[in-house]
Image (tube, grey):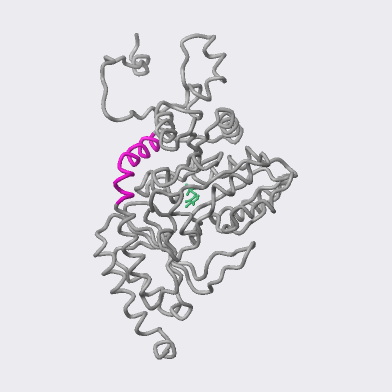
């Protein structure tokens, strides 16, 4: 054989190797032992291997592990959390039908609904996240899917998912949950009547702020096949390298969550008494909308919560945030580093106006020592409280 050919010959090392880690299987082309196997490859997109886009042993390993945590028949990984929202929605709704979203949905949902679903003839209806079984009055013969997101992005309302799911189920309508905040370690949507449990792996499951991925889990094999078909039509896929990183993140998820949860609760409770704070939104605080439901349905909290800031504290807020040493300014969350997102006002609502007109801070608490985080906020915000607070409020 010539050197040119030898350069292309795959070596066959002994097969007895095993390690504790799922190997990274990179592939576009997948090869078949026979012509018959090649010709039957379409059937293997669901559980086997036909083309790198449809799955590798690395992505299947991640899906199997997620399915175990979700108590699902099947999980499906896709290239982002938002891609998981898109494929679930498109797999359920046809032209002429409606999809319901909570008013507190992840922010890209609104432009997606207005500019993309609208163009397909699918109507998005936004609803008050706290309406519980009152969702019944919004369900029609045209409703194809109800999304829930609990707690809601930025404003942290906890939804009565079992009541919403029961109302939808009575009419044969599917329910999808964006469970990114809780992760399957704190809430298992499929155990509460939900059909599609979606999570952004980009956040806690990976946990290291260095990849984008999402997943949808279902209790029903037929739904899984439908989702997988739509992933094929849309050209969705994930890389084995990133699945390998997600698998590594998953190994430490439980201990990371325990630490983030404890530190966040300490800070949330302390922040409640700070002068610039109008309200702290954290599901574990008794004042949080839906707190009793959170106690009933969730097995714990995580490290993300919001602070509604008094309007008078707008002056000097940017300086206070920029003065923080241990918090990066950013939108994403769920990693080992603490991050804060700063909004000049709560995100727009259409179902029911939001009753706060000051800034909103959304903290994602990482693994730094909680005393350092508290001292950081205390130091950087002390001037804000002293300088910016109007004298009338100090007197009253
Ligand atoms: C980040 C996020 C998403 C989207 O996930 P990406 O992987 O960033 O696309 C969806 N829902 C919620 C609640 C999120 O926080």
231 lies left or right of 371:
right
Q: Position of residue 108 (x, y in %)?
A: 56, 54
Magenta-tinted stretch: 241-258
Q: Nearer the viewer, residue 238 or 44?
A: 44
Q: Is residue 341 visible?
A: no
52 lies left or right of 127:
left
The C terminus lies in which quarter of the figure?
A: bottom left
Q: Nearer the viewer, residue 391 or 128?
A: 128
Residue 1, compared with residue 145, is above or below; it is above
Give the quarter of the image for residue 70.
Answer: top left
Does the stretch in magenta take in 257? Answer: yes
Residue 96, compared with residue 368, is above or below; it is above
Q: Is residue 178 visible?
A: yes
Does the stretch in magenta take in 180? Answer: no
Give the quarter of the image for residue 13.
Answer: top left
Q: Position of residue 263 (x, y in %)?
A: 30, 59
Q: Position of residue 23 (x, y in %)?
A: 33, 28
Residue at (45, 51) in percent of width and height: 296
Identify the main secondary structure in magenta.
helix
Q: Position of residue 313 (x, y in %)?
A: 43, 78
Give the quarter of the image for residue 97.
Answer: top right
The N terminus lies in which quarter of the figure?
A: top left
Residue 227, compared with residue 287, is above or below; it is above
Residue 256, compared with residue 221, is above or below; it is below
Residue at (33, 63) in percent of width and height: 327
Residue at (63, 57) in percent of width and height: 127
265 lies left or right of 139:
left
């Amino acid at each position: 054989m010539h050197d040119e050919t030898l350069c292309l010959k795959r070596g066959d090392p002994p097969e007895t190797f095993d390690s504790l880690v799922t190997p990274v299987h990179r592939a576009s082309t997948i090869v078949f032992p026979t012509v018959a196997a090649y010709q039957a490859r379409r059937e293997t997109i669901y559980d086997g291997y036909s083309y790198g886009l449809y799955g590798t042993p690395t992505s299947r390993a991640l899906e199997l592990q997620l399915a175990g945590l979700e108590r699902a028949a099947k999980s499906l990984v896709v290239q982002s959390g938002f891609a998981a929202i898109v494929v679930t929605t498109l797999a359920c709704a046809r032209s002429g039908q409606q999809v319901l979203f909570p008013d507190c949905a992840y922010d890209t949902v609104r432009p997606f609904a207005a500019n993309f679903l609208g163009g397909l003839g699918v109507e998005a209806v936004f609803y008050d996240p706290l309406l519980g079984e009152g969702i019944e009055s919004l369900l029609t013969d045209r409703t194809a899917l109800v999304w829930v997101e609990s707690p809601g992005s930025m404003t942290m309302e906890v939804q009565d998912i079992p009541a919403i799911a029961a109302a939808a189920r009575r009419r044969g309508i599917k329910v999808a949950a964006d469970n990114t905040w809780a992760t399957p370690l704190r809430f298992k949507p499929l155990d509460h009547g939900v059909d599609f449990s979606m999570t952004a792996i980009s956040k806690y499951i990976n946990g290291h702020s260095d990849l984008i991925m999402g997943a949808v889990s279902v209790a029903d094999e037929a739904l899984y096949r439908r989702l997988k078909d739509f992933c094929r039509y849309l050209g969705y896929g994930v890389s084995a390298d990133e699945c390998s990183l997600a698998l590594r993140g998953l190994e430490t998820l439980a201990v990371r969550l325990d630490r983030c949860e404890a530190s966040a609760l300490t800070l949330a409770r302390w922040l409640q008494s700070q002068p610039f704070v109008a309200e702290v939104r954290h599901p574990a605080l008794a004042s949080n909308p839906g707190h009793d439901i959170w106690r009933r349905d969730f097995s714990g909290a995580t490290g993300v919560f919001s602070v509604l800031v008094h309007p008078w504290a707008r002056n000097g807020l940017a300086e206070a945030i920029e003065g923080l040493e241990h918090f990066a300014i950013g939108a994403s969350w769920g990693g080992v580093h603490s991050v804060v997102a700063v909004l000049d006002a709560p995100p727009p609502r259409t179902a029911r106006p939001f009753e706060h007109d000051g800034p909103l801070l959304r903290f994602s608490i990482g693994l730094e020592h909680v005393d350092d985080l508290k001292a950081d906020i205390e130091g950087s915000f002390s001037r804000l409280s002293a300088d910016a607070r109007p004298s009338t409020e100090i007197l009253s």
